[in-house]
Amino acid sequence: MDLLASIKMFVAVVDAGSFAGAANRLDISRAMASKHVLNLEDHLGTRLLNRTTRRSSVTESGAVFYERSVQIIADIHEAEQIAGNMATTPRGSLKITMPLAYGLHRMGSVIAEYVRLYPQVKLNISLSDRTIDLVEDGFDLAIRIGTLPESGLIARKLGVERSLVCASPSYLKLHGTPQSPSDLAGHACLGYSLTNSGDEWRFEEQGQTVAIRCNGPIKADNGDMLRLAALSGAGLIFQPLFIVAEDLRAGRLVQVLQEVVSRELGIYAIYPSRKHLSAKVRTFVDFVVTQLAKSAIE
């Protein structure tokens, strides 16, 4: 029998002064009310109530257990209210992991605006380009870029990005500008080591996927590291627009192969379950979708 239900029945009997009164209050039979308390006494190994034909009185052990039981029931009720409120009102700690460069270049202002709108949510953000196990490491949410592996996690698309091939003016002046993807084989291509495609740079050309194997003097697991190397003239990079946009506008980097379209990179929010999704996760994901759509239009 449900231990908590039996505890609640015991408290109701003490409050009502009889099994009949408690049974009427909880809309169950007197026999069932008595069975709950008997099972509770068997579980505890002590008598809680002295029974007569008309009334019940609490024993010394029962009086101590009653006081604790009243507090336990109140604590459970409060916990239920808090949990219910958290499902409807964004509050509490929200632990998020996202790629380092994406967090730095895209999410700073979005995060600042979110906490302004939802001051009861405290964000705990980990910036890492490596895939983190959400459940094992206790994260509520992840933002990930590119093709997602099969998993039991829930994914919601936030937006898309495209990668561009860029180099510094000094590199292009010294080594020439590639005119087609096949020309990349003769250039220093700085590789991103965490990509699913390995050393291949993939493009869409006339409806066909073109994969070019590139080699270069530098490979790194962070796009900003490669951007800095490219700015110094070390070679070509194939990185998302959010990493190179400011340098392109300032002329520090130059886009090449502009007529070739790179494959879209999906931006996804990943979370463990759609069932009973907390308000803090739901509002954060909705807010990011809105903000990214707004910035894309602008």
Image (cartoon, rainbow, N blue to C red):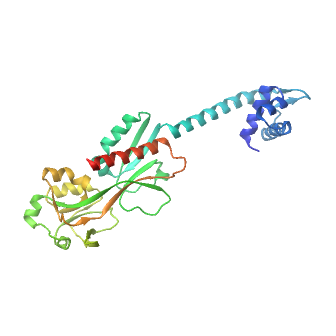
Image-based side of 59 in relation to 288, left or right: right
**Horizontal side of residue 122 vs 7, given as left or right:** left
Q: Position of residue 223 (x, y in %)?
A: 26, 56
**Residue 70 sits in which quadrant?**
top right
Residue 36 shows in the view: yes
Left or right placement of residue 62 versus residue 115 in this view: right
Residue 66, x across and y down, in percent:
74, 29
Report the residue at 31% width, 68% height from top: 198
Comparing 222 with 279, the one in front is 279
As drawn, which residue projects farthest toward the front? 297
Q: Is residue 224 above or below residue 63?
A: below
Of the 4 image quadrants, the one containing the N terminus is: top right
Label total for image: 0
Residue that appears at 28% across and 49% down:
297
Q: Does residue 213 sit above or below 134 in this rendering?
A: below
Instruction: Inspect this view and state whether residue 61 appears.
Output: no
